[in-house]
Amino acid sequence: MTQLLNLDGGISAPFEIHQASADTTDATQTTLATIAVAEDEIVMVWAWCQTIQDDGSQGYSAIKAGSYRRDAGGDVTLIGSVADIFEAEDSGGAPDFTFTADTTAQTVDLDWTGEAATNYAVKLTYAFMRQGTA
């Protein structure tokens, strides 16, 4: 489920806040959300991800930010690196929340990877601001 909370910044770069959730059962990467990046556009993304195992015995929390651009006829590109502002977990494995530049779909994907044979309830809040050249 994804929910949009839209805040118009009153300028040419709107700011949007979204929420998404998923239940995962293994270590397969799950795309929780995608953000399209148009040609001649820059998008800055902030995300807050938290999860808890279904029995409450393990958890994961992270805050990350990244900036992406796409020139005319080009692919979505990460500018610099994704900032890991905060990350904490107490699991027996290696769960992870990542940003991925998808150059086929021209999107920024917000991905969760859980653990084998472990049920997690994942909650994501993310925000982005976009600006084009036009």
Image (cartoon, rainbow, N blue to C red):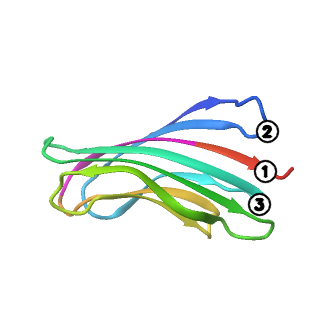
Left or right position of 99 against 69: left
Amino acid on which the number 3 mark rests in the picture: Glu
**Nearer to us in this view, 20 or 57:** 57
What number is the disc on residue 12?
Answer: 2
Task: Answer whether residue 124 is magenta in the image.
Answer: yes
Q: Residue at x 65, y 51 (%)?
A: 43
Which secondary structure dominates the residues rendered in magenta?
A: strand
Amino acid on which the number 2 mark rests in the picture: Ser
Q: Do the residues labelled 1 and 2 touch (CB within 8 Å)?
A: yes
Q: How crowded is mark 2: few (under 14 residues within 10 Å), some or many (20 or more)?
A: few
Q: Give the range drawn in magenta.
A: 118-127
What number is the disc on residue 39?
Answer: 3
Instruction: Give the quarter of the figure containing the N terminus.
Output: top left
Q: Which residue is drawn at 65% across and 43% down?
A: 129
Residue 71 sits in which quadrant? bottom right
How many numbered tags mark residues here? 3
Left or right position of 104 against 113: right
Amino acid on which the number 1 mark rests in the picture: Gly
What number is the disc on residue 132?
Answer: 1
| Distance from the alpha carbon under mark 1 to that under mark 3 | 8 Å
Q: Which residue is drawn at 79% across and 70% down?
A: 73
